[in-house]
Structure formats: structure tokens, C-alpha cells
Image (spheres, grey):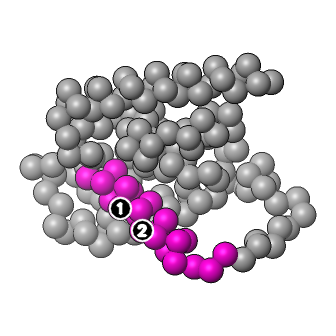
Amino acid sequence: MEFIEAYEQHVWGVYGFLAYRTRSPEEAEDLTQETFERALKAWPRFDPARNDARPWLLVIARNVYVDSRRRQAARPRVAPEVEVGAGPESAGSIDANLGPDPEVSAALARLKRREREAIALRFGADLPVAGVAEVLGISVANAQQILSRSLRRLRTLLEQSAVNY
């Protein structure tokens, strides 16, 4: 498999994972780009005979996401300048409907980090449970348990927010 093939096959899965983990399509797009930049640099070390590109890329995406959060935590907080008319719907190449809707995003934010990550891998990256387990470095049974509990908790949070409206 060539790098361009891996990119074409997996870019939307990587973006979907990051869209579930971030709060903005623009950030997910930037982190997707950074993921593939890192992957391209590491590509000579990747062995398609031994590994599947999808989980390999998602591990890189996960590391890129963690690194971005560390960088954000290290920066002093400054109120962002907001450009009039700017927003997800005005970003030319980004579909504002990608990623979870705002209500689901708010509920996801209330889950534990591991729960959010498992849901992002399963539904954002569209990985099977075995793939989630591989990326997280856990057993399939453990991944199933985390996903089951996370989805129950997410459902409860969404039901609570629906009652409050």
C-alpha cells in the first residue's frame, strides 16, 4: 500500500475520530492534517504486511490530539478575536454537519476521557470494536464493556438534557 492510498482510504475515518474529540470542525481538520503529516514522515517505518494502516493512523491521530491539548494547556488563556461571519458554516471545505451535533457534543464532554475516546473511535472513525481495542491497547472484551457503559451513560445524559428543555 502506498501512502496516498492510505490517505484516500482513511482520511475521513481519522477526521471523524477527531471531530468527535474536538469541539470545532476547523480544529478537527487541522489535527487531521497534522496526523497525515506525521504519518508521511513515519511511512518508511510502516510495514503494511504486518500492520493495517487504519489503526496505525488512528494511534497517530490520538497522539496528535493529546499533544494539541497539552499545547493548549501550556498557553496562557487569551480571549479569541471573533471575525464577523466566521464559523463552521462559513468554512469553505468543511461540512458543518460532520461530527456529532451540539447536544451530543455537550453530553460527550461530560463523559470520562476514556469513554469519549472509545465512542470517537467506534462512531467517529467507524472502527469495529476489535479496532477500538487495538488502538486503545486493550482486550476486545474490555473495549465492549467500555463502549456499552459509555453509551448507557451518554443516553442518560441526553435524556436528562431533553427533560430540561
To which residue does mark 1 refer?
63
Q: Crowdedness of circle 1 by 10 Å Cα count: few (<14), some, many (20+)?
A: few
**In x, y percent, where is residue 50?**
9, 49
Extreme left residue here?
A: 50
Q: Position of residue 37 (x, y in %)?
A: 40, 69
Label disc, if present, on residue 123 of the rendered structure: none
Q: Which residue is mark 2?
A: 67
Instruction: Label 1, secondary structure: give it.
Output: helix
**Residue 119: in sight, yes or no?**
yes
Disc 1 marks which amino acid? Answer: Asn
Q: Position of residue 94 (x, y in %)?
A: 66, 51
The boundaries of the magenta stretch are: 56-77
Is 64 a magenta residue?
yes
- Residue 32 picture location, percent across and down: 48, 58
Determine the residue positioned at 26% across, 56% down: 2
* Residue 121, placed above or below residue 53: above
| Image-based side of 46 in relation to 150, left or right | left
Labels 2 and 1 touching (C-beta < 8 A) = yes
Q: Is residue 25 above or below residue 42?
A: above
Q: Amino acid at mark 2?
A: Asp
Q: Residue at x 55, y 71 (%)?
A: 72
Task: Give the answer, above or below, for where 150 lies relative to 112.
Answer: above
At a point 45% along the width and 43% down the height, the residue shown is: 112
Majority secondary structure of magenta residues: helix
The answer to whether 44 appears left or right of 118 in the picture is left
In this view of the protein, can residue 117 be seen by the observer? no
The quarter holding residue 97 reads top right
Q: Nearest the camera: 5 or 25?
A: 25
Q: Nearer the viewer, residue 128 or 74?
A: 74
Left or right, residue 151 beside residue 39 = right
